[in-house]
């Protein structure tokens, strides 16, 4: 269970107990179902992390919306490959590190709250940008983006930290999006429409 969910679970459980104590069965059952959903939403299952040193794993559960080769981007210098992952309210929302690297930068930007599946969400929504650099000098960037419902981005790593592939580092509450920017030389392993699991699904390989 993700600890960020504890306050929500306790509140829902407390309200359910009050309804039950007062004998208001018409509200007790829906409240109990709501508590169960919140517990399920904040689940944090273990994942089998690929051992290939060149593998770049997905930082989020969800569906691939975009795979696009870019000549330039606000989050990467020069050519890169962008992968966008949409996280619905039914996905696990714990985010994980794509590869072993050093955190060389973290930039937070306040913004709007458009639906996360829209293209403009990448630039205009509230987002948190994380920059990694591998031992070989490869630069990878990924962006936590708030959505229409998601209003809370959580990041638990800091600039200068050394991180491991598949390591948990944060989450975005209640549905959102995560964009990944890979070196143009990376070999992709996913395509639009694929469903991915954080820490397990290989997005691509560093060459």
Image (spheres, helix red, strand yellow):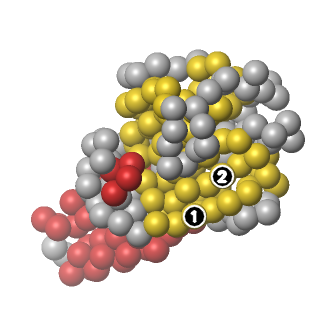
- Of 166 and 79, the residue lying toward us: 79
Residue 201 x %, y %: 60, 27
Task: Name the quadrant of the N terminus.
Answer: bottom right
Residue 157 x %, y %: 69, 63
Task: Name the quadrant of the C terminus.
Answer: top right
Residue 198 x %, y %: 58, 38
Determine which quarter of the picture holds residue 111.
bottom left
Give the left or right position of residue 201, taking residue 32 as reference: right
For the residues bearing labels 2 and 1, Cβ distance under 8 angstroms: yes
Give the left or right position of residue 53, taking residue 34 as reference: right
Residue 181 x %, y %: 56, 38
Which of the two discs, 2 and 1, labels the residue nearer the N terminus?
A: 1
Which residue does the numbered mark 2 point to in the structure image? 131
Give the left or right position of residue 161, taking residue 143 as reference: right
Give the left or right position of residue 59, taking residue 176 as reference: right
Q: Is residue 134 visible?
A: yes
Residue 17, numbered label: none
**Whole-number angstrom distance, CA of label 2 to CA of label 1:** 9 Å
Q: Is residue 4 above or below residue 124?
A: below
- Looking at the rendered structure, the secondary structure element under dot 1 is strand
Determine which quarter of the picture holds residue 38.
bottom left
Other residues around mark 2 within 10 Å, as few (<14) / some (14–19) / many (≥20): many
Name the residue located 59 percent from the left edge and 18 percent from the top edge.
Answer: 189
Q: Is residue 100 above or below residue 40?
A: above
Name the residue located 38 percent from the left edge and 75 percent from the top edge.
Answer: 11
- Of 91 and 207, the residue lying toward us: 207
- Of 204 and 28, the residue lying toward us: 204
Name the residue located 17 percent from the left edge and 67 percent from the top edge.
Answer: 27
Which residue does the numbered mark 1 point to in the structure image? 107
């Amino acid at each position: 269970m993700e600890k960020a969910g504890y306050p929500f679970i306790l509140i829902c459980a407390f309200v359910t107990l009050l309804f039950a104590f007062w004998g208001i069965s018409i509200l007790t059952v829906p409240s109990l179902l709501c508590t169960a959903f919140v517990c399920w939403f904040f689940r944090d299952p273990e994942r089998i992390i690929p051992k290939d040193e060149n593998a770049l794993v997905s930082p989020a559960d969800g569906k691939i919306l975009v795979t696009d080769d870019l000549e330039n981007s606000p989050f990467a210098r020069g050519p890169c490959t962008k992968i966008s992952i949409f996280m619905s309210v039914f996905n696990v929302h714990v985010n994980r590190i794509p590869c072993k690297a050093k955190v060389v930068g973290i930039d937070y930007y306040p913004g709007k709250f458009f639906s996360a599946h829209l293209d403009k969400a990448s630039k205009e929504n509230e987002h948190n940008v994380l920059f990694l650099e591998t031992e070989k000098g490869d630069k990878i960037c990924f962006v936590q983006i708030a959505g229409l419902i998601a209003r809370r981005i959580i990041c638990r790593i800091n600039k200068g930290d050394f991180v491991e592939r598949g390591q948990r580092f944060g989450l975005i509450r209640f549905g959102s999006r995560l964009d990944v920017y890979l070196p143009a030389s990376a070999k992709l392993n996913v395509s639009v429409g694929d469903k991915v699991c954080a820490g397990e699904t290989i997005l691509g390989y560093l060459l």
